[in-house]
Image: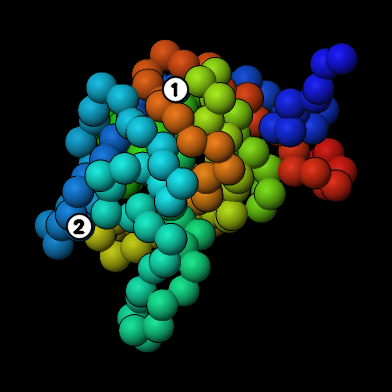
Amino acid sequence: MTRKDPADDGYTLGQGRVVSVHRRATPSDATIAKPAVEHIEIGPWGVQGDYHAGRWTVHGSGKKRPNHRMVTIVSAELIAWIARQIGIQLRPGDLGENIHVVGLGDLTRMRPDDRLVFASGVVLRITGQNQPCRKLDGYHPALKTLLRNRRGVLAVVERTGRIRPGMSVLWQRGRGQPDG
């Protein structure tokens, strides 16, 4: 008897590839960029060794809240769009992402509860669009406004493992959501 993989909900919308992976151990006041690494380990609370990993997050209010941004994903298509719009050339990692992908579009059509399923078995559940922050002003004064609701996506971990460049990734519609 074969069992259906719980990550496979039958609503695959696209297939892409990991271009690069990134992490930064501590936040920087000077830059949002994260350096590229050979691979990342996805633990239960995010990218191991990255400052956004953790079960909880504390923001300006000082209140501890569940972390909905354990992993960030940005696409090559978004970087190309930025270059066309305002003429600046950003590199993978410059927007603070952990995973830079190609082949899935600019990620603006991804919805909360959609999943990214990587060839290694890692499954990430999308929690929403990543909103731009003030650190983007260092690249271009219009970038923060340009990237409202399109700076890539945030995700939490459903299945742990390793992600490396060149790996394939499937975009699947979240359970119970109609396509379109």
The reply, left or right, for residue 131 in relation to residue 149 is left
- Density class for disc 1 (Cα within 10 Å; few <14, some 14-19, many ≥20) is many
- Given the current orientation, which residue lies at the most extreme front position? 1
Residue nearest the viewer, comparing 157 with 93? 157
- Density class for disc 2 (Cα within 10 Å; few <14, some 14-19, many ≥20) is few
**Residue 134: percent from left, percent from top:** 29, 65
* Residue 50 appears in the rendering: yes
Q: What residue sits 46% from the left and 46% below the top?
A: 44
SS at mark 1 in the image: strand
Q: What residue sits 51% from the left and 20% below the top?
A: 120
Kind of residue indicated by mark 1? Val
Disc with the residue nearer the chain's start (2 vs 1): 1
Which quadrant is the N terminus positioned in? Answer: top right
Residue position marked by numbered label 2 in the rendering: 27
**Residue 24: percent from left, percent from top:** 22, 45
Q: What residue sits 49% from the left and 36% below the top?
A: 160
Which quadrant is the C terminus positioned in? Answer: top right
